[in-house]
Image (cartoon, grey):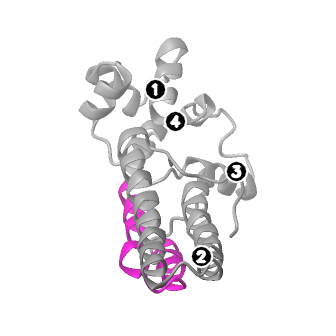
Amino acid sequence: MSKLKKIREIQNLTQEELSEKSGVSSRTIQRIETGKEPKGYTLRILAKALQIEESELQTEKNEKESSTITNKKQLQKTILINYATLKLINLSSIPFIIIPPFNIIVPIILMLILKQKNTLTKELISVQILWTIIAPIVFILGIFLKLGHQFTLILMILIALSNVFIILRNAIEIDRNKKLYYRLKFSML
């Protein structure tokens, strides 16, 4: 199986969808998947459409001679993100917003079960961890203001809705641009 076909299938794209996304004809994609080496413009545009490095689409001449460690690193790099699974992991936090530890535990369990230990998934869970740390602090500060029970109730609702908004906005961005809208430059995992 060619590298292009593996990557395309991991990203849940058909040849036609990849053709639309990249502007490369379906016939050219078929040729590449049956063994023709992509070059020049075609290589660049396919790599850009799949959000990978150009070298990941090229076959190496000494591939059999490379060590298993190098192969594992390339495989981890080539194993791209299953965006449908990433969206599921993201949305799994919503039912557990009221019980904060579970809005982190459930996505971590799903990440491990669905084998999605990639940077985007870790960033997604890191956002939930940060929210879980900040939310009680904001709530306690609101209580210290002593503005009454109604204010406290409104504050609790706003804190929960803020997390729903973050989760839904990230889900929309995953669908549209295959990235997170709210993300951290570091991972807490």
User: What residue is disc 4 on?
Assistant: 51
Q: Which residue is mark 3?
A: 185
At numbered mark 1, what does the secondary structure look like: helix, strand or loop?
helix
Tell me which numbered mark, 2 or 4, is placed earlier along the sequence.
Answer: 4
State how far apart marks 2 and 3 are (Cα).
29 Å
* Foreground: disc 2 or disc 1: 2
- Residue at horizontal 33 percent and vertical 32 percent from the top: 18
* Residue situated in front as seen by the camera: 143 or 92: 143
Whole-percent x, y for residue 46 in the image = 46, 26
The answer for how far apart the CA atoms under marks 2 and 4 are is: 43 Å
Q: Which residues are magenta?
A: 84-113
Magenta span main SS:
helix
* 2 or 1: tag closer to the N-terminus: 1
Which residue appears farthest toward the top when viewing the image?
Answer: 41
> Percent position (x, y) of residue 109?
50, 80
Residue 160, given in percent of the width and then of the height, sits at 44, 72
Decide: is 69 above or below 158.
above
User: Which dot marks residue 142?
Assistant: 2
Structural distance between the alpha carbons of marks 3 and 1: 26 Å
Q: Residue 120: percent from the left, percent from the top?
A: 56, 55
Of labels 2 and 3, earlier in sequence is: 2
Q: Nearer the viewer, residue 101 or 122?
A: 101
Task: Look at the image and tell me whether residue 30 can be seen.
Answer: no
Other residues around mark 4 within 10 Å, as few (<14) / some (14–19) / many (≥20):
few
Q: Is residue 63 above or below residue 84?
A: above
